[in-house]
Image: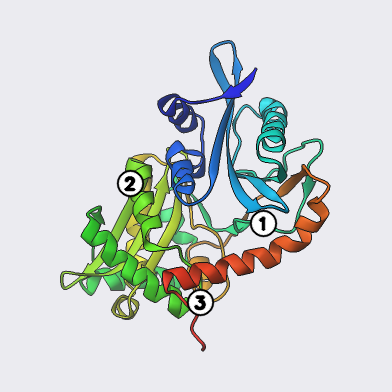
């Protein structure tokens, strides 16, 4: 039996107990709802017990396409129940939201074998990332690093960089100022400021922010979404002073060691993007982890048109986000 879940505690308990990704937590769904999305949380039950769950986010699109549904790093649970779960999700999307498609980005290297779904080249999350298995020893993880990465970790610590966990509104605002500076320098897009405060509020203990300080001032930060299975790098940034000190090296290693100590299973670097950020990430492991292809289930005769329009629509939304947040790519 597949049904809607309305109980946040029951939902999060299942996600946390069954290897779920932070993007499948109730709080992450509430962040997206606060910024224009809708959420449907469906569970498959065997008697009274949940055996699989999926959080589907719905983005309104206007008159032509109406909406699309998106599953980020889900479903969670017994794979045998995924087809029934996603069949019901497709029905809800089609009947209640007139959605043009259901997009699924699975939390695995293995492709979900699902009828009526097809691979698509248009992904929302990066398929490639650096993924550290935190059951490995710290010595083994360091052995996978580039020599320069190990050197910069030691250098930033010896130069006086200190790491601490932050949560106050003032500290978060300082981190976001650095984030805006980093976005301009690196040429990527960010949300408006309230979005990040909502992440801290609605994700609660599953939102973890570490800051690197020098002479009592924050010079870099790293923001994680955390479940028992996965620590996922949501956001991060470094000031010009922090860059000179290589503060982000000591910061990341502190986060990795802390997540390992907490018993988290994997540490995900949050995807690979072009430029210096990607090169920095590649210094932490010799292996790149590649998730399975993104898959779509068409729900409307307009789906072929949607596939053509989506890449252009993503670029337009990114430009609008830069304008609202005040973040614009550098011209260099």
Q: What coloring was used for the rendering?
A: rainbow
Residue under numbered circle 3 = 187
Per the image, the residue denoted by label 1 is 123
Vertical comparison of 199 with 83: above or below: below
Do the numbered discs 1 and 3 sit on residues whose CB atoms are within 8 Å? no
What residue do we see at 65% from left, 17% from top? 1
Residue placed most toward the observer, 262 or 16: 16
Residue marked by disc 2: 201
Q: Is 67 displayed left or right of 50 in the figure?
A: right
| Structural crowding at the residue carrying mark 3, measured as other residues with C-alpha within 10 Å and reported as few (<14), some (14–19) or many (≥20) | some
Gap in Å between the C-alphas at discs 1 and 3? 20 Å
Can residue 65 be seen in the rendering of this structure? yes
- In this rendering, would 241 be left or right of 317? left
Q: Relative to residue 55, is residue 310 depicted above or below?
A: below
Q: In what element is the residue under mark 2?
A: helix
Q: Earlier in the sequence, mark 1 or mark 3?
A: 1
As helix, strand or loop, the secondary structure at mark 3 comes to loop
Please state the horizontal and vertical placement of residue 251, each as a whole percent of the image. 33, 63
Residue 88, x across and y down, in percent: 69, 29
Label 2 or label 1, whichever comes before in sequence order = 1
Locate residue 178, reporting x and y percent.
33, 71
Residue at the (55%, 59%) spot, across then down = 271
Circle 2 or circle 3, nearest the eye:
2
């Amino acid at each position: 039996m597949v049904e809607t879940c309305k109980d946040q505690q029951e939902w999060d308990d299942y996600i946390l107990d069954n290897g779920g990704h932070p993007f499948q937590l109730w709080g992450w769904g509430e962040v997206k709802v606060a910024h224009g999305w809708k959420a449907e949380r469906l569970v498959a039950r065997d008697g009274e017990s949940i055996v699989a769950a999926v959080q589907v986010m719905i983005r309104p699109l206007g008159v032509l396409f109406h909406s699309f549904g998106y599953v980020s790093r889900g479903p969670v649970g017994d794979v045998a129940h995924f087809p029934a779960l996603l069949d019901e999700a497709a029905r809800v999307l089609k009947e209640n939201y007139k959605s043009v498609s259901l997009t699924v980005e699975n939390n695995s290297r293995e492709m979900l074998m699902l009828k009526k779904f097809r691979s698509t080249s248009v992904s929302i999350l990066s398929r490639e990332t650096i993924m550290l298995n935190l059951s490995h020893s710290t010595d083994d993880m360091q052995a996978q690093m580039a020599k320069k990465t190990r050197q910069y970790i030691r250098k930033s610590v010896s130069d006086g960089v200190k790491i601490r966990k932050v949560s106050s509104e003032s500290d978060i605002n300082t981190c976001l100022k650095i984030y805006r500076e980093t976005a301009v320098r690196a040429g990527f897009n960010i949300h408006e400021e309230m979005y990040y405060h909502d992440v801290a509020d609605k994700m609660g203990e599953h939102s973890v922010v570490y800051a690197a300080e020098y002479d009592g001032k924050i010079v870099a930060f790293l923001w994680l979404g955390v479940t028992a299975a996965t620590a996922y790098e949501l956001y991060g940034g470094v000031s010009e002073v922090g860059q000179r000190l290589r503060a982000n090296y000591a910061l990341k290693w502190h986060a990795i060691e802390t997540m390992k100590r907490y018993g988290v299973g994997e540490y995900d670097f949050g995807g690979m993007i072009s430029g210096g950020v990607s090169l920095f990430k590649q210094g932490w492991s010799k292996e790149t982890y590649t998730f399975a292809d993104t898959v779509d289930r068409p729900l409307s005769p307009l789906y072929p048109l949607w596939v053509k329009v989506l890449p252009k629509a993503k670029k337009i939304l990114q430009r609008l986000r830069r304008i609202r947040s005040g973040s614009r790519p550098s011209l260099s």
